[in-house]
Structure formats: structure tokens, C-alpha cells
Image (spheres, rainbow, N blue to C red):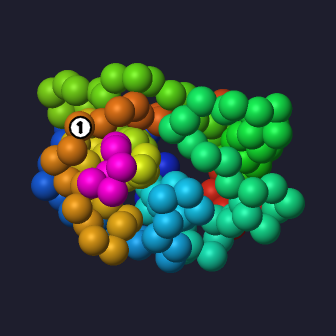
């Protein structure tokens, strides 16, 4: 499954209904719906990489609370929590030889075929992670699925640290 996801993320050029359908078909809904402690980011990572939800770590059980994302960290403790939270994600993605690169602009282009994460302000006023293809939301992990068509605040793109050595979960 991960090999197909890597193929989708890096090598499928040309957005097609088939590419969008394959991403949607493996869509995973978040298990916790909460503006602060939800797991839409985890569900979006699982969907984008073609992994089961249980294969993606729940950072709440790694010794750190999930920081309040989308607001300025006002205390040293909040900054430390945010760094630890992102550190866990970078360690996890690094085990596949991947990282995330953030852009404040969505990628828009003619049929680039780029599967990436996007962040929107949900109708409930909190930041929410979705899965996109070329800047278009193709999977909303929220049970309400009410974020389609909302503008992207920013995007996180998967980048291979060494494209020749992107690893599938089975190789770890």
C-alpha cells in the first residue's frame, strides 16, 4: 500500500479522476473530533501514505500533549510542546525517508499530480488538516466532511530526503 502511495505522491503526473478516486478510496476518517485534540493530521497522514490509521502514531501517547496549533505559542511550555509534537512527526516520516515542507500557498498548476496535506479553517473555527491533489481538497477526514471548497491556509508537501531510498513500512 505504501509503495502505491509513494507512486501517487512522487511519480504520477497528470491529475486524473483516477488519481483523485484512488486517494479518496483509501480515505480514513479521524477518530477524535475536537478543535484542540482531534486527530485529523494523523488521519490525513495515513490517507496520503496509504497506511491504516493504527500504523500512524498517536502523538498523545508519546509523552506530549498536542499543542494548540494555529495560534501563537504564548508560553515556553507551549513552544516546547509544539517542537516536541512536530519532532515526533518528523521522526516518524523520517523512518520512511520523508519529511514535510510547508508552503503558505497551495500548489496550483496544470495536472502536476501532487498529493499533499492542506490546512483549512474549519466551519467550527479551528484549523483542520485535509488531503489535497494539486491544491484541491480530495479528502476531508472529518465525519462531517464540511471542508470541501474552503480556501487552504497553507500546505505541507511530502519531500523525499533521498529519493532513491524512500522506504515502505514493510522495510522498517
Q: Quadrant of residue 36?
A: bottom right
Which residue is located at x 38 percent, y 65 percent?
Answer: 141
Query: Closest to the observer: 59 or 71?
Result: 71
Position of the C terminus by quadrant: bottom right
Residue 121 on the magenta span: yes
In the visual, does 109 lie left or right of 172? Answer: left
Q: Where does the magenta region start and end?
A: 120-125
Whether residue 144 can be seen here: yes
How far across and how far down the image is residue 60, in percent? 73, 64
- In the drawing, does residue 6 fall left or right of residue 110? right
Residue sticking out furthest to the right: 63
What secondary structure is marked by label 1? loop
Q: Is residue 159 visible?
A: no
Q: Residue at x 26, y 66 (%)?
A: 145
**Which of the 4 quarters of the picture holds residue 13?**
top left
Which x, y percent locates residue 112?
26, 31
- The answer to whether residue 42 is magenta is no
**Magenta stretch, overall SS:** loop
Question: Looking at the picture, how far across and down is residue 106, in whole percent?
Answer: 31, 28
Query: Is residue 88 shown above or below 21?
Result: above
Neighbourhood count class around disc 1 (C-alpha, 10 Å): few under 14, some 14–19, many 20 upward: some
Position of residue 35 relative to residue 81, above or below, is: below
Q: In the depicted view, which residue is nearer to us: 162 or 79?
A: 79
On the image, numbered disc 1 is attached to which residue?
A: 151
How many numbered tags mark residues here? 1
Q: Identify which residue, 32 or 130, lies in the foreground.
A: 32
Q: Is residue 68 above or below residue 147?
A: above
Residue 138, image quadrant:
bottom left
Where residue 48 sits: x, y (%)? 44, 55
Residue in the image at 52% along x and 73% along y: 32
Relative to residue 30, is residue 109 drawn left or right?
Answer: left
Amino acid at each position: 500500500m505504501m509503495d502505491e502511495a509513494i507512486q501517487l505522491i512522487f511519480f504520477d503526473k497528470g491529475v486524473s479522476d483516477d488519481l483523485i478516486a484512488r486517494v479518496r478510496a483509501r480515505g480514513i476518517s479521524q477518530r477524535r473530533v475536537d478543535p484542540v485534540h482531534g486527530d485529523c493530521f494523523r488521519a490525513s497522514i495515513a490517507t496520503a501514505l496509504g497506511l491504516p490509521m493504527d500504523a500512524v502514531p498517536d502523538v498523545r501517547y508519546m509523552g506530549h500533549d498536542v499543542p494548540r496549533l494555529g495560534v501563537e505559542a504564548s508560553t515556553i511550555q507551549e513552544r516546547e510542546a509544539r517542537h516536541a509534537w512536530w519532532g515526533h512527526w518528523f521522526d516518524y516520516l523520517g523512518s520512511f525517508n520523508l519529511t514535510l515542507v510547508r508552503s503558505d500557498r497551495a500548489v496550483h498548476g496544470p495536472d502536476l499530480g501532487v498529493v499533499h496535506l492542506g490546512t483549512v479553517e474549519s466551519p467550527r473555527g479551528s484549523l483542520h488538516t485535509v488531503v489535497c491533489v494539486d491544491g484541491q481538497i480530495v479528502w476531508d477526514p472529518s465525519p462531517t466532511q464540511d471542508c470541501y471548497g474552503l480556501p487552504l491556509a497553507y500546505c505541507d508537501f511530502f519531500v523525499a530526503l533521498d529519493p532513491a531510498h524512500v522506504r515502505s513500512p514493510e522495510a522498517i
